[in-house]
Image (cartoon, rainbow, N blue to C red):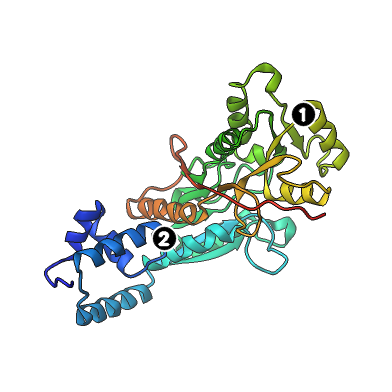
């Protein structure tokens, strides 16, 4: 039953959220998690909330007008070449960041920083940013071994996606890889697995400060000595792909009954002819593909992009520029997803 006296503030108090969050939920905004939107919408319906159609039209016109008012440009600096289809790398972060900033009146413009591969040099990019009056920069996840970027930081507010950047010292936002490996290990233990191994890409793990290895060693240290499995490093020392013989020798040596790896590892193991989970269980530590077919830890890439944009706007509005005294790292939690494992054979 409808109740015209119920306001958005009443709904906010009932749900334990802000009135702005209620407003976003009732507009079905993608800025909120689906479960949050549904919970608020259900509460509003149960309380009999009625939308004033005239007020709704007015607010829509105001939001559209505000969205068209561009306050400035923010640079998204990436150091990787374009994808084969011509799209930007790290679009899973760049797109939600761009949408978040657009609602605040800012346009996110990408720049390719890599003079050796057809992109801009640091000097060229610096001149462009100064000439266009850019105040804020989002740094995309870095390519391996690149840990420094030199731009006119005294004039710029900046936030980095990923945690590989050492210079300048700016806030960093990333998925919680430590939690990912930890949850994967514990979920496999709940399935009755006792000899759990991990395939860890050496180069990528270096970019996340050995978070995968740290979490895996921490969890496996709680096992009886005879049940501990040594990490299977890939890409070290010769930057090569894992072979079937190499994997099988490792599996037989430790009698592995469960493996934690990435999506490419899962696909490769299927291509080797293994049946999962008949031969061994598998959990994906970075689950982004709903069609992958195996269980794993799903990263919250949308929130990573939004959080980076949110922190950057705070720095811009408060005049926080340049190098910081200390790094600040924000880790974004994900969630566990189940899947139906299969075989390519």
Q: Residue at x 42, y 63 (%)?
A: 100
Above or below: residue 78 compared with residue 285: below
Residue 256 location, x and y as percent?
74, 32
Judge by depth and name the residue closer to the eye, 229 or 66: 229
- Left or right of 55, for residue 117: right
Q: Mark 1 — residue?
A: 255
Q: CA distance from mark 2 to mark 1?
A: 41 Å
- The answer to whether residue 47 shows anywhere in this view is yes
- Identify the image quadrant of residue 180: top right
Q: Residue furthest right?
A: 245
Residue 326 location, x and y as percent?
45, 34
- Left or right of 105, for residue 238: right
- Left or right of 236, for residue 187: left
Mark 2 or mark 1, earlier in chain:
2
Q: Secondary structure at mark 1?
A: loop
Q: Mark 2 — residue?
A: 34
- Identify the image quadrant of residue 212: top right
- The answer to whether residue 209 shows anywhere in this view is no
């Amino acid at each position: 039953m409808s109740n015209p006296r119920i306001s958005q503030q009443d709904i906010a108090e009932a749900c334990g959220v802000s009135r702005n969050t209620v407003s976003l939920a009732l507009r079905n905004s993608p800025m909120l998690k689906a479960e949050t939107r549904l919970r608020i919408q259900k509460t509003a319906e149960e309380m009999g909330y009625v939308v004033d159609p005239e007020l709704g039209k007015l607010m829509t016109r105001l939001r559209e007008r505000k969205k068209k008012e561009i306050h400035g440009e923010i640079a998204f600096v990436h150091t990787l070449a374009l994808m084969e289809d011509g799209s930007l790398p790290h679009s899973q972060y760049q797109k939600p960041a761009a949408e978040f900033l657009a609602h605040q009146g800012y346009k996110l413009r990408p720049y390719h920083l890599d003079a050796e591969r057809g992109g801009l040099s640091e000097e060229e990019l610096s001149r462009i940013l100064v000439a266009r009056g850019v105040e804020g920069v989002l740094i995309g996840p870095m390519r391996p071994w690149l840990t420094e970027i030199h731009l006119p930081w005294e004039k710029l507010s900046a936030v980095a996606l990923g945690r590989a950047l050492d210079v300048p010292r700016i806030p960093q936002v990333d998925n919680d890889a430590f939690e990912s490996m930890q949850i994967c290990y514990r979920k496999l233990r709940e399935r009755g697995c006792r000899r759990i191994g991990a395939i860890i890409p050496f180069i990528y793990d270096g970019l996340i400060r050995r978070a995968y290895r740290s979490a895996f060693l921490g969890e496996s240290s709680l096992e009886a000595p005879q049940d501990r499995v040594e990490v299977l490093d890939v890409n070290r020392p010769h930057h090569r792909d894992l072979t079937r013989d190499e994997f099988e020798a490792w599996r037989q040596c430790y009698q592995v009954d469960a493996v934690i790896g990435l999506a490419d590892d899962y696909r490769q193991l299927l291509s080797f002819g293994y049946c999962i989970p008949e031969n061994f269980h598998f959990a994906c530590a970075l689950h982004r593909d709903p069609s992958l077919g195996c269980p794993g830890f799903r990263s919250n890439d949308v929130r990573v992009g939004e959080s980076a944009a949110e922190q950057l706007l705070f720095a811009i509005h408060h005049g926080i520029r340049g190098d910081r005294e200390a790094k600040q790292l924000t880790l974004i939690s994900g969630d566990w997803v189940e899947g139906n494992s299969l075989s390519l054979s």
